[in-house]
Image: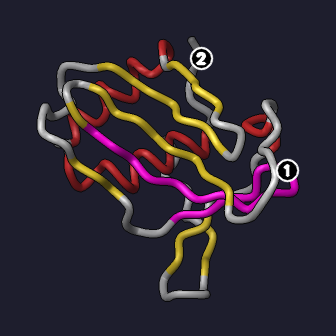
Amino acid sequence: MEGLRKFEREAIELLAGPHLSHDALGSVLESSISASIEHTGVGYFLTIRHAAIPSERVVCSTPMLSCMLGERLCGFVVFMESGELALECHQFGDGDLPLDCRSHAGPLKISIQQGEATDRPSTGR
């Protein structure tokens, strides 16, 4: 079990925030200390279980987010279903994503239009 890194918290806020109440999102993020991580080789899934997460499947892929994890450019998608929120981190490109990639994250970027990205403004959380 692991806690969230700052970039993961920000990705969840941006992707899942429109689908959860402010209180529910805060509660989910507070409970993230018991998150589980499953490495897939080309990325990972970070899963949080919480009663405030919808039972029906919701896929949260906008806005398009990216981040450098070490030397690899990665993107993010959130899946919510049956009381679980899964943050998928997937790399753009070939090769394996190192197991320690979460420790080497650059700033989270938000794509405004295809091919353009900007730094994510800090929320102070």
**In the image, is residue 75 part of the stretch drawn in magenta?**
yes
The magenta segment is 65-80
Mark 2 is on which residue type?
Answer: Glu
Mark 1 is on which residue type?
Answer: Gly
- The quadrant where residue 14 appears: bottom left
Q: Secondary structure at mark 1?
A: loop
Query: Which residue lies under the disc numbered 2?
Result: 2
- Residue in the image at 30% along x and 27% along y: 84
Residue 80 at x, y percent in the picture: 27, 39
* Mark 2 vs 1, N-terminal side: 2
- The quadrant where residue 23 appears: top left
- Residue in the image at 74% along x and 64% along y: 93
**In the image, is residue 61 part of the stretch drawn in magenta?**
no
Q: Secondary structure at mark 2?
A: loop
User: Can you say whether 22 is above or below 92 in the image?
Assistant: above
Residue 28 at x, y percent in the picture: 32, 27
Q: Nearer the viewer, residue 40 or 103?
A: 40
